[in-house]
Amino acid sequence: MGQYFKVVNITKKEQMRPHNFGSGAKLMEFSSDGMSIMQGLAILLADGNGRGGGDLRSENPIVGSWAGDQIVITGDYADEGNFTEDPQKNLYDVSNDYKDVSFEVQRALADDSWW
């Protein structure tokens, strides 16, 4: 099988799932995939988008909304108690209750004709 990963914003209690971007969920599948969850992570972390050539052409407020937050790429085999209040659960499982912003990020990417 293998370990499956997702991107989690602990600060905002939000997440993105690789499968929602058409990417595999294993670390090396989504981290080396072209326009995918990693591009979504880049626009979430972008500080100062829209000020130069090559920036994402989108006014969507989600762009840059994770800048400065505590972000973890967590796997379903992650250690229990890391980044969680429950020592019996791992972040992958706890974050199942977090808001999934995958499709909102995709809408922001789709604002730009290049994407």
Image (cartoon, rainbow, N blue to C red):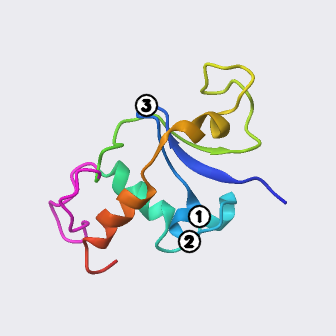
Q: Is residue 80 left or right of residue 69?
A: right
Mark 2 secondary-structure assignment: loop
Tag 3: amino acid? Thr
Q: Is residue 110 above or below residue 90?
A: below
Tag 2: amino acid? Gly
Residue at position x 36%, y 57% in the image: 104
Q: Nearer the viewer, mark 2 or mark 3?
A: 2
User: Toward which corner of the image does residue 30 lie, by quadrant?
Assistant: bottom right
Q: Which mark is residue 19?
A: 1
**Image location (x, y in percent) of residue 87:** 71, 19
Q: Can you say which quadrant of the picture contains the C terminus?
A: bottom left
First in residue order: circle 2 vs circle 3? 3
**Image location (x, y in percent) of residue 79:** 75, 32
Q: Please indicate, yes or no, whether residue 58 appears anywhere in the rendered image.
A: yes
**Image location (x, y in percent) of residue 19:** 59, 64
First in residue order: circle 3 vs circle 1? 3
How would you classify the magenta stretch by its main secondary structure?
loop
* Residues drawn in magenta: 47-62
Residue at position x 60%, y 27% in the image: 83
Residue under label 3: 11
Q: Is residue 77 above or below residue 51?
A: above
Q: Alpha carbon of mark 2 to alpha carbon of mark 3: how far?
A: 26 Å
* Residue farthest along the bottom direction in this orientation: 114
Q: Kindly indicate whether the residue at mark 1 contacts the one at mark 2 (C-beta within 8 angstroms).
A: yes
